[in-house]
Amino acid sequence: MNNNSNIEYIDTNIVENDINGTQNDLQVATDNQNSTKFDLKNKKVNLNAAKSDLKIAKSALFEHKSAEFSDCNISDIPKHCMALCKGNSVIVDDKHGIRPMLDFITKQWDLTGYSVADIVVGKAVATLFVYSKIKAVYAHVLSKPALEYLNAHDIEVEYGTLVDNISNRAGDGICPMELCVANIDDANKAYFALKNKVEQMMKK
């Protein structure tokens, strides 16, 4: 664990291009390509108090004022859709579903060894975690197929609620992304299957 109390905090909801963060500042890209400085002290993430990257990721997901806490209560409401942490690097993203991970992979962000806290984790995004060499996962809601898949790939898992499957947005069936990888166990094949599925759905 890096005991430096300064972190590189990347909010992908603001920053869409390549980011060179410093220990105390985050360069925020705006629509007109101008930039401002963001004071990381406002985030109040205490790395010295953190016991693990996963706890920091959970803290960032729920925006707790300190990373020193036992467990997130499942009644807590996440403030972001996904948060990742490795050492003094924290990334948050508010896009839903598998989009954050697909974007990271497309942009070739190296997430090897990161820990992830996510609102909903089904097998689809679990395959992308394995593809990206994520080391630990916290899911506010976790599906049984995802738990089985992550366990099979020796990824540490914590969760708030365990469900049979991840439903589609209408709530009348299983999520199409889950169906896409239901019979795929190879993470590389799963990535390309999901990428193609998203592209097909966007054309409709």
Image (cartoon, helix red, strand yellow):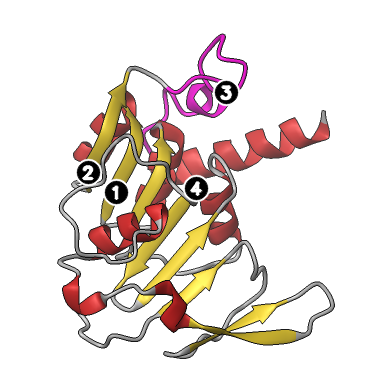
The quarter in which the C terminus is drawn is: top right
The mark nearer the N terminus, 1 or 3, is 1
Kind of residue sitting beneath label 4 = Cys
Q: Residue at left 19%, top 79%?
A: 48
Q: What is the number of the mark on residue 176?
A: 3
Q: Secondary structure at mark 2?
A: strand
Residue count near mark 2 (Cα–Cα under 10 Å), binned few <14, some 14–19, many ≥20: some
| Residue depth check, mark 2 versus mark 3: number of the one nearer the observer | 2
Residue 115 visible at all = no
Q: Name the one closer to the observer, 130 or 24.
A: 24
Q: Secondary structure at mark 3?
A: helix
On whether residue 157 falls in the magenta region, the answer is no
> Looking at the image, is 114 positioned above or below residue 184?
below
Q: Residue at left 47%, top 29%?
A: 181
Kind of residue sitting beneath label 1 = Val
Q: Which residue in the structure is indicated by mark 2? A: 157
Q: What is the number of the mark on residue 137?
A: 1
On whether residue 169 falls in the magenta region, the answer is yes
Percent position of residue 163, x then y? 32, 21
Residue count near mark 1 (Cα–Cα under 10 Å), binned few <14, some 14–19, many ≥20: many
Which residues make up the magenta segment? 166-186
